Image (tube, rainbow, N blue to C red):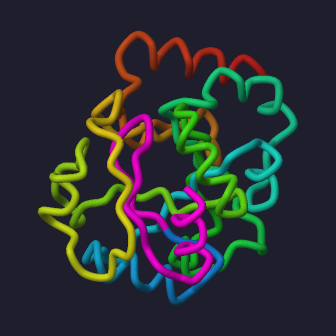
Amino acid sequence: MKEAASVVKQGELIVYPTDTVYGLGGDPFNEEAVKKVFKVKQRGDKPLPILCSSISDVEQIAYVPEWLRPKLDLVWPGPVTLILKKKPSLPEIVTCGREDVGVRIPGMGFTLELIKACGGFLMGTSANISGTPPPSTVDEALAQLKEEISLVIDAGPTPLKISSTVIDLTVQPPRVLREGYLAGAELRKLLEELTQHE
């Protein structure tokens, strides 16, 4: 973990496990690292999500509405990415110039400790070429990503094996952008609980 954090702080990229799928990580405040992620993933004009180690970290890069604060324990830590209004502290290159950002606190202890060791933030995009299935094992990730990866952490298959659910909270009512792990009745229940403030 210490070595991985050192690599990230030097502007390099890592492949690391999360509760959902393997991630391609780097320092979101290092524009060269962000450019490398776009290059490695062959990703077009599509914003990158950010994993945080705590709610206070989230609040450094995104605006958390007052009505949402008491409800955050419904989604975090866990497999739900929330789209929130971004703060100027986050480089625009991360969000491709958009005014919002996807943020998540993952539900895996190791990942949280890794993010904390990296300063509280880690790019949280899946370790795959854009448009291909996200990897739940290191082998699946490395079959696609070979260039520019400085360190790989192999923790075996990820627990959930499917990407996070993405909910846009910059609009009302909240809009589901990707079902991911949380779906069906469970997702509908969460949406109801998130909209009870209205």
Residue 3 inside the magenta-drawn segment: yes
Residue 89 in percent (x, y) is at 77, 73
Magenta region: 1-25
Residue 178 inside the magenta-drawn segment: no
Image quadrant in which you'd find residue 45? bottom left
Left or right: 19, with 142 as reference point: right
At x 62%, y 76%, the residue is 9
At x 16%, y 57%, the residue is 132
| Above-or-below relation of 32 to 144 | below
Furthest-right residue in this view: 66
At x 35%, y 42%, the residue is 155
Residue 107 in percent (x, y) is at 54, 31
Image quadrant in which you'd find residue 112? top right
Residue 26 in percent (x, y) is at 51, 70
Nearest to the observer: residue 45 or residue 26: 26
Residue 2 in percent (x, y) is at 60, 61
